[in-house]
Image: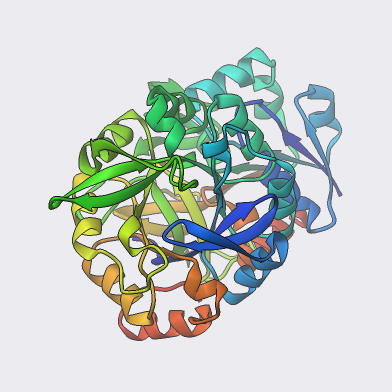
Amino acid sequence: MNVAIVDLGCGNVGSVAVGFERLGTDIRLTRDPADLLAAERVVLPGVGAAGFAMERIDALGLRDILTGLDKPLLGICLGMQLLFEASEEDDIACLGLIPGKVRRLEPGPGLPVPHMGWSRLDVREDGAGLRSGDYVYFAHGFAADDGPYSLATAQHGRTIPAVVRKGNLTGAQFHPERSGKAGAHFLRAFLSC
Amino acid sequence: MPAARIIPCLDVRDGRVVKGVQFRDHRDVGDIVEHALRYRDEGADELVFYDISASAEDRSLDFDWIRRIGREIDIPFAVAGGLRSREQAAACLEAGADKVSVNSPALERPELIGELARDFGSQCVVLGVDSLARDGAYFIHQYTGRVDRSRDTGLATLDWVREAVDRGAGEVVLNCMSRDGVRNGYDLAHVAAIVAAVPVPVIASGGAGAPEHFRDVLLESGASGALAATVFHDRIIHIPELKEYLASCGIEMRR
């Protein structure tokens, strides 16, 4: 399996890359459109801010490539948020591939933000290699609205889509590469979807 | 709320794990990757690696050991010690770290926190503080990695933590210096005061000596996690048993 990991030059692609390498996957860190077209799977990782990431996508000329892919694409954390229509973070339009918006998580007593740590999943639909009750690692201050595309959710003040799927697109709000065995199962399921 | 996190802290010097009592008399306790793997296998939720000498000696981090850990473990980890620039933080994250923790250099130049938060997101930026009581109030200490440079900044802990979070820190590791390595319990009142002051997760550090100390800080202070070193390194507390005990006390644990 040949996996292209999009390196926007704005964040943490290192741990995503080793997450796949641990599974014996042949990965390529790239920002070259030709690599994305040639790969069997594309991964859009990302930490950092939505505005800067979208700027980089446009500056590198990747918007049309990413929106036009018909092979499996996995967005991780910020990479998942970019698949939606818009984000409150930097108040920007995103790739618009999945209906819905990304909103700020509101802190409260007993509810710190960012949502940081291991949260329990509720799995609504099989197919992502995860089971209800699995704990996976989150680190984010913004989250997409829950909706019909949620395959698995977690709770942090509100219901947070932890995994979304629409057609060839999968998004993970959590960090599979840092989620122990459950995360590895999820990555394996993506490689075989 | 996520499960409460149990976080072993590994003090690193020259790629080896070391541990001192009240920041002094460091002794070698072993190889860094071996320790990381052992804690991962035992169910640690996260690891923190402090390069204890880097900040005080004005040298930057050696990124090779970060890469070794990043390859081996599949749980999150933070790296701390002497990070002074966006470039150094980027190199840590590139090497596989999930978060960077800033302490003394952020006190030298508070703008550093905002620069890191802007480029990498607040969830990557941890504020480490070393806090010590004097005349009934808590103050921030700087350069605590070295006895000869460690100093009281005169800055109130509450004020500095609030400022750092306003600047973009996404988590606070509060180390209560008087408790470090002495194993008589976390400083619950101090942790609770910091939890109440900021919206971000607060990790309690300093003082763990018995499972009851973890129970108390997680039930009573509002801390999102508890960090410890000595009790884990010296195998006084075994993480699987600790987590079973805490779960039996009604604390949500990842197991």
| Colour scheme of the picture | rainbow
Q: Nearer the viewer, residue A110 or B90?
A: B90
Q: Nearer the viewer, residue B164 or A187?
A: B164
Query: Exactly how many numbered labels are in the figure?
Result: 0
Residue B20 spot, x, y in % from top left = 51, 62
Expressed as whole percent of the image width and height from the top left, the position of residue B42 reads 59, 76
A39 w.r.t. A32: above or below: below
Residue B31 visible in the shown view: yes
* Residue at 25% in and 57% down: B191
* Residue B87 found in image quarter: top right
Q: Residue furthest front?
A: B148
Question: Which residue is at the front of the view, A70 or B72?
Answer: B72
Residue at the top extreme? A59
- The image shows residue B48 at horizontal and vertical percentages of 53, 55
**Position in image of residue B62 (x %, y %):** 69, 40
At 32% from the left edge and 34% from the top edge, which residue is drawn?
Answer: B164
| Quadrant holding the C terminus of chain A | bottom right
Write the residue at 52% across / 74% down.
B232
Q: Is residue B10 above or below residue B146?
A: below
Viewer-closest of A152 and B1: B1
Q: Is residue B251 visible?
A: no
Relative height, residue B71 to residue B234 (above, below):
above
